[in-house]
Image (cartoon, rainbow, N blue to C red):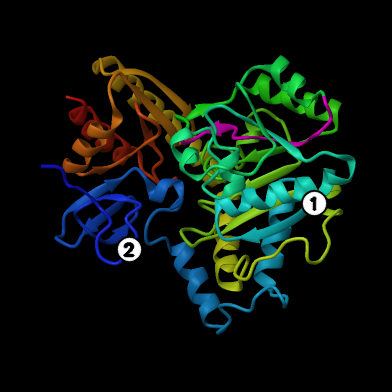
């Protein structure tokens, strides 16, 4: 009998969830209400970069709570948000930062900022890519190549075109009429199957945008902030975007998104152009400030790269011993195990064996454990995955 149910009780039933109820967590492990232990390779879908019960998160929370200042709205200045914005532009590129509550909201804001920048010149359209996922809101969904997510909610935001990743000629053709405000792409496609975009294509995309006076948006909501072994995934290719969107790991498990906009975009924005009640509040910003500082430390990123090399070795053994594995792809601690069968039953079997996984499309098992995971924990998790494959 399946342990999957729709959400019970008073919650809207938009999720299919296992029957057990998670009760606590520590490091890379969680426990349910019955005391059963699970090794967590989901990290809240790449959110809990520092694992469960992180002292970095706890200390930042405690320090900000002690001030009594949890929320003020953006009618007033607070120090944590301003310091976080300064840190992000120092780590990414000069410009301005807008804070919000989620990745979908970050991409929505990025689209608005791009239209604000290009609207006077007739640049109001967008170019996205097949295999993309940018969120569930109307603008973000319009740029998401997932018919099952899109079709029930048509019509979506108009003006979005799609190209194949790697099709440089198609990109230039799509930009040739001068009406595209921005191109949006994930340097590593997450929901689309954990597919890294090759560096030469990202560089070609940058040149095409420069030649057509089009903005380049990198959606690093899942692949950013240390997940690939570099602070930002675009650093692997040496391609700097005009707009960068961040979210999942930003505030250590608290809801927060951010848009980093280059100076020429940030200068076009005026009071009233966009807003949020909760975005960048002092509590979440204080936690995010501590998290980003921690992840940005060279020693931390070096450790992620070392752990990633160990994961390479373990995945290579898995692929050589399990015929169900057709390929392995990804960067850093964001990997996709491509199967010759549906991923759902494998994820379910692994859960029965004590390993929490998430799929990325019909036939891909996604591995996005906390960035703090130990090599020995990777070994245990991959042994369980091997057993789940049969």
> Which part of the image, by quadrant, shows the C terminus?
top left
Quadrant in the rendering for residue 78: bottom right
State left or right for residue 268 relative to residue 335: right
Total tally of numbered discs in the picture: 2
Which labelled disc corresponds to residue 11?
Answer: 2
Write the residue at 27% across / 34% down.
344
Residue situated furthest left in the rendering? 1
Does 187 appear in magenta?
yes
Write the residue at 40% across / 26% down.
312
- Most foreground residue, 152 or 134: 152
Residue 161 image offset from top left, x and y in percent: 66, 30
State left or right for residue 77 relative to residue 1: right
Write the start and end of the magenta stretch as one range.
177-191
Q: CA distance from mark 2 to mark 1?
A: 40 Å
User: Circle 2 — which element?
Assistant: loop
User: Circle 1 — which element?
Assistant: strand
Task: Say if mark 2 contacts mark 1, CB within 8 Å.
Answer: no
Residue 248 image offset from top left, x and y in percent: 51, 51
Q: Is residue 38 visible in the rendered structure shown here?
A: yes
> Which part of the image, by quadrant, shows the N terminus?
top left
Q: Which residue is mark 1?
A: 95
Quadrant in the rendering for residue 322: top left
State left or right for residue 281 relative to residue 332: right
- Most foreground residue, 36 or 117: 117
Task: In the rendered view, tell whether residue 260 sits above or below residue 169.
Answer: below
Write the residue at 25% across / 15% down.
323
Q: Label 2: how many residues lie within 10 Å, few (<14), some (14-19) or many (20+)?
A: few
Write the residue at 58% across / 43% down.
155
Mark nearer the N terminus (2 vs 1): 2
Task: In the rendered view, tell whether residue 158 sits above or below residue 293.
Answer: above
């Amino acid at each position: 009998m399946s342990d999957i149910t729709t959400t019970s009780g008073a919650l809207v039933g938009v999720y299919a969830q296992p029957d057990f109820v998670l009760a606590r967590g520590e490091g890379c492990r969680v426990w349910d209400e019955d005391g059963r232990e699970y090794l967590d390779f989901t990290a809240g879908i790449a959110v809990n970069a520092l694992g469960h019960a992180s002292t970095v998160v706890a200390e930042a929370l405690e320090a900000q709570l002690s001030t009594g200042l949890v929320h003020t709205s953006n009618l007033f200045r607070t120090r944590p948000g301003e310091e976080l914005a300064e840190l992000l532009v120092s780590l990414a590129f000069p410009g301005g930062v807008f804070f919000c509550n989620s990745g979908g909201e970050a991409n929505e804001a990025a689209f608005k900022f791009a239209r604000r920048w290009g609207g006077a010149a007739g640049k109001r359209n967008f170019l996205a890519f097949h295999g993309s996922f940018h969120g569930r809101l109307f603008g973000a969904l319009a740029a998401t190549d997932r018919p099952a997510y899109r079709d029930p909610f048509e019509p979506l935001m108009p003006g979005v075109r799609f190209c194949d990743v790697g099709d440089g000629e198609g990109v230039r053709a799509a930009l040739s009429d001068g009406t595209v405000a921005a191109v949006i792409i994930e340097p590593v496609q997450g929901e689309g199957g954990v597919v890294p975009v090759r560096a030469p294509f990202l560089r070609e995309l940058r040149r095409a945008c420069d030649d057509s006076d089009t903005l380049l948006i990198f959606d690093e909501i899942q692949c950013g902030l240390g997940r690939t072994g570099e602070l930002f995934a675009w650093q692997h290719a040496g391609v700097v975007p005009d707009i960068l969107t961040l979210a999942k790991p930003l505030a250590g498990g608290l809801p927060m998104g951010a848009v980093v906009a280059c100076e020429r975009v940030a200068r076009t924005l005026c009071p009233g152009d966009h807003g949020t009640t909760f975005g960048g509040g002092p509590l979440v910003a204080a936690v995010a400030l501590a998290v980003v500082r921690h992840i940005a430390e060279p020693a931390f990123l070096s450790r992620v790269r070392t752990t990633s090399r160990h994961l390479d070795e373990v995945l290579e053994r898995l692929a050589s011993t399990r015929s169900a594995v057709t390929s392995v792809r990804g960067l850093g601690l964001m990997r996709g195990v491509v199967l010759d069968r549906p991923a759902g039953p494998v994820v379910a079997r692994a859960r029965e064996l004590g390993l929490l996984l998430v799929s990325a499309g019909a036939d891909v098992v996604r591995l996005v454990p906390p960035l703090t995971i130990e090599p020995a924990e990777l070994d245990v998790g991959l042994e369980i995955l091997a057993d789940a494959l049969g």
